[in-house]
Amino acid sequence: MNLKKVHKKGASSAGCTLFIETLPMALVQDIINIIEEIAPSGWAEKWDNAGLQIGSLRQPVSAVFIAVDPTTSVLERAIEANTQLIITHHPLFFHPLRQLSLETSTGKIITRAISKNISIYSAHTNLDMAPDGVSTALIERLALKDVQILKEEQTPPPLHNKPVPIGYGCIGTFKTPITFKQFITKIKTDLQLPYLQMAGKAPARVRKVAVCGGSGSQLIEKAHKSGADLYITAELKHSHARMAEELNFCALDIGHFHSEKFGMMALARLIRKRLEKQDLRVSVIEDRTEKSPLQLIK
């Protein structure tokens, strides 16, 4: 609780002193601290550029905008929504800038964000590996139970006194097996898929499912060895599609964007809960307009 001291003049010359309760103002640093609780930056891959992309840690925040990619259209919607912080999954900067040109999309985003006092933050591979991350969100959308990590990674020692189970991908099961046709109908509905691609052989029935949001093509053999009936991921490479074919194993490519958007929606919910616990009055807005850059031409 914050108490603000206010002097009010009364009938007497002394007047009176009032104490008014005020909610603490949130800063960019406060929001980052919350994300660090969910997906510590130390979990990110060494090559990754997760973290603050643009802005100031001391910037006041009354509204946060959540999206998958830091694009010009996302930025404009964030400005329209009167937000001060954009949280994306993919970083704005994957490689060091050699020049800042206003003619490039990145240059335009940088200058536009700065001119509007908007900070941009990325939670990337650290969110991919988090227990409440991208793959877990897919598992929850499909209502799979008995969840396990597909490929475990070690928690960096400085971050936690006790090891925390983190890694890429998840495995879950249905209480009752369903037919492959029923599963395809379910996945297209639950994950709002306009289309999907398949490699390998479709199973007759589906009970155990392996998933990995994002580019999880390289985990196809591990998914097969886990005993899963099929594997859901994105950006399935040609060689891995052939591997599925040789293994008589089913691999489904649902597209990169669709495999990660629910992870960002889950992150928005987690941030809201923590803001409420800390009595920080910040609006968390999800970009429901954002779409995959890839469209199916029929």
Image (cartoon, rainbow, N blue to C red):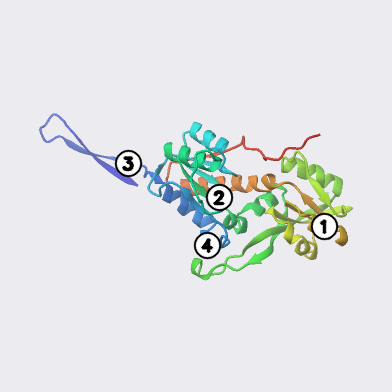
Name the quadrant containing residue 207. bottom right
For label 4, the SS is helix
Residue 250 vertical position relative to residue 77 in the rendered view, above or below = below
Q: How far apart are the alpha carbons under marks 1 and 2?
A: 33 Å
Q: Nearer the viewer, mark 2 or mark 4?
A: 2
Report helix, strand or loop for mark 1: loop
Relative to 146, 272 lies left or right: left
For residue 278, say whether it is visible: no
| Distance CA(mark 1)–CA(mark 4) | 33 Å
Q: Position of residue 227 (x, y in %)?
A: 80, 63
Instruction: Find numbered disc 3 in the image and state the secondary structure of the residue it sits on.
Output: strand
- Tell me: 44 left or right of 187: left
Label 4 sits on what residue type? Answer: Gly
Q: Nearer the viewer, mark 1 or mark 2?
A: 2
Q: Name the quadrant containing residue 17.
A: top left
Amino acid carrying label 1: it is: Asp
- The kind of residue on which mark 3 rests is Glu
Residue under circle 3?
21
Q: Which labelled disc corresponds to residue 229?
A: 1
- Looking at marks 3 and 4 on the same chain, the residue that comes earlier in the sequence is marked by 3
The residue that label 4 is drawn on is 42
N-terminal label among 3 and 2 = 3
Of callouts 2 and 4, the N-terminal one? 4
Tell me the CA gap for discs 3 and 4. Answer: 37 Å
Q: Is 208 placed above or below 60 here?
A: below
Q: Earlier in the sequence, mark 1 or mark 2?
A: 2
Q: Earlier in the sequence, mark 1 or mark 3?
A: 3
Q: Which residue was labeled with disc 2?
A: 91
Q: Say if 124 sits above or below 43 in the image.
A: above
